[in-house]
Image (spheres, rainbow, N blue to C red):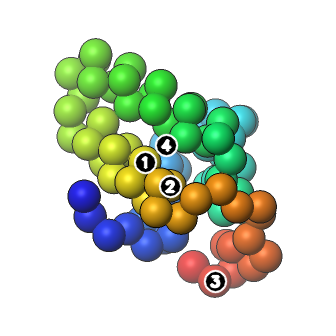
Amino acid sequence: MLDLTDDDVRSILREYRNGGAISRLYATGEITRETLTEIGVLTTLLDEEGKDEAAERLWDVIGYLDAVGERPPVKGWTAKL
């Protein structure tokens, strides 16, 4: 797994914003159990579609989520990036 920065995570998630937990992480830095679930489901779907590189990048995001843990929205999230 790569050591991702907050900016790396936002870049990876940009195209997967869904109006749910992934969008909240992208926009605010908030991480909940739902975030991990949504990204896990998306990773599985991409794997099934043969989009291995995209799925691998999302596995890196999952590693980031595991390392950071749950957190509320981060004040100044987009400004600090």
Please state if 9 lies on the left or on the right of 69 as rendered. Answer: left
Q: Which mark is residue 65?
A: 2
**Is residue 61 visible to us here?**
no
> What is the distance, in whole Å, between disc 2 and disc 3 at their CAs?
19 Å
> What is the distance, in whole Å, between disc 1 and disc 3 at their CAs?
22 Å
Front of the two marks 1 and 3: 1
Front of the two marks 2 and 3: 2
Q: Give the mark nearest the N terminus, 1 or 4.
A: 4
Q: As shown in the figure, which amino acid type bears the numbered disc 2?
A: Leu
**Is residue 39 visible to us here?**
yes
Circle 4: is it few (<14), some (14-19), or many (20+) Cα within 10 Å? few
Q: As shown in the figure, which amino acid type bears the numbered disc 4?
A: Glu
Residue 21 image position (x, y, % from top left): 68, 41
> What is the distance, in whole Å, between disc 2 and disc 1 at their CAs?
5 Å
Q: Which mark is residue 62?
A: 1
Q: Give the mark nearest the N terminus, 1 or 3.
A: 1
